[in-house]
Image (cartoon, grey):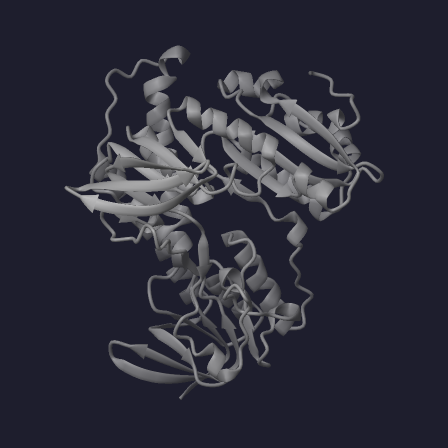
Amino acid sequence: MAAFDLVVIGAGPAGYVGAIRAAQLGMNVALIEREALGGTCLNIGCIPSKALLDATHEYYLAKNKFSSRGIKVGDVSIDLPTLMSFKQKVVRQLTGGVGSLVKKNKITHIKGNARLLSASTVEVTAEGGKQTVEAKRILIATGSKPVELPAAKVDGKHIVDSTGALSFDSIPKKLLVIGAGAIGLELGSVWSRLGSEVTYVEFLQNIAGAADAEIAALLQKSLEKQGMSFRLGAKVTATSIKGGKVTVTYETGGKSESVEVDRVLVSVGRKPAIEGLGLEQIGVKLTARGAIEVREHYQTAVDGVYAVGDCIGGAMLAHKASDEAIACVERMAGVGGHVNYDAIPNIIYTAPELASVGLSEEQAKQKGHEVKVGKFPFTANGRAKSMDEVEGTVKIVADGRTDRVLGVTILHARASELIAEAAIAMEYSASSEDIARSVHAHPTLSEALKEAALAVDGRAIHF
């Protein structure tokens, strides 16, 4: 029977990162994964979706903006099979890279389905049979899976989840997306750029979940200009398939409406993937929402068994999961790892991108803060003008008494890169004055953060 210092179950951004950090700290580590290394993120989530988003955005620019910049490209068309091959090439490169890192760090990779027999014993079932692995500690990092919607059951062809929407074999003429959160907005954007007529049906009265309401409304207007339409405050009640078409019925404003489309994407959230692990049989407790309940330092109710990432709930973000895994194994080794949940960036990779960290203006007020707000539009930023990417704004929410930055939201084509400065500022408890007094190079997009910080006290220079 193989014995290890640490057995990690799941090889996504939480599992493989935790395994590598544990190996760096001198532990003998086994990594159990039933599917491909890299988990949902690298295989059917973050990475393939970004490959499609970036490629289709270039296609959109070539069709709609290049000529105004003096770039003549002639007729532009899309080769869908080649686009999908590009996406898979990116996936193969990155998952292969994870495999190399696992070998480099002398981590034992065991392929199969894991089931906990005790706090120190894991049974692994694979095609070749079963084996038992002993561990001083066990780290569960099994991630999440799409939430199912009874009124729109996924069949993998006409009605799909996020995995299916990454691999359509043809461009749907009409696509209906149920849910206007990050995943739905991103994948809807991909197919809209390729020519689909995209309609969103969202239960909430706003898009982008808990994002700052003012900035989310600006994003919605931008997406509507691109041709997407939204039915907010609407609940899907039924779907039916006939003749290759899907009829979707939804209620809104007390009325029932129906629309016929070619494909439906169900994107109403994700839930922990923990079935078949034998958790409750060994005493691991679950929350009311079906996530693994953890105590301080990610310990479950069973000593020696830990859990991190999507399977413990909270914001389901790859970078959050990775940092939790690092903090968890560092604590095992006596190193002071931690995660600051107030400074975790969240990004929606639409065009423009919506990136945020910390509290929205609404959330800050709900928590009882007296707030000051500073905003600066990219229309007044020299670098944005030279890029012909002026759509969007920076919004900083600061405490009215202490000036400490409570949250930052950025809407812009490069928001995903700009948000890191705000995250660092919040990690070190910066004030808006700290950002405002820091010299930002000119001309850069980052100057918009400086100006927004100046605007908190009404002293922006360029607007």
Looking at the image, residue 278 lies above or below residue 250: below
Q: Is residue 354 left or right of residue 357?
A: left
Residue 153 is situated, as x and y percent measured from the top left of the image, at: 30, 53
Quick one: 105 or 398, which is closer to the camera? 398
Q: Quadrant of residue 357?
A: top right
Which one is in front, 78 or 326?
78
Give residue 378's position: percent from left, percent from top.
59, 21
Residue in view at x 66 percent, y 63 percent:
337
Q: Is residue 51 visible?
A: no
Q: Residue at x 27, y 82 (%)?
A: 129
Residue for point 74% across, 34% down: 435
- State whether residue 140 is above or below residue 70: below
Above or below, 150 relative to 179: below
Query: In the image as oriented, which residue stretches furthest toward the left?
Result: 243
Position of the C terminus, as image quadrant, is top right
Q: Is residue 59 left or right of residue 233?
A: left
- Residue 197 position within the rendered picture, expressed as x and y whole percent measured from the top left: 30, 29
* Outermost residue, front side: 254
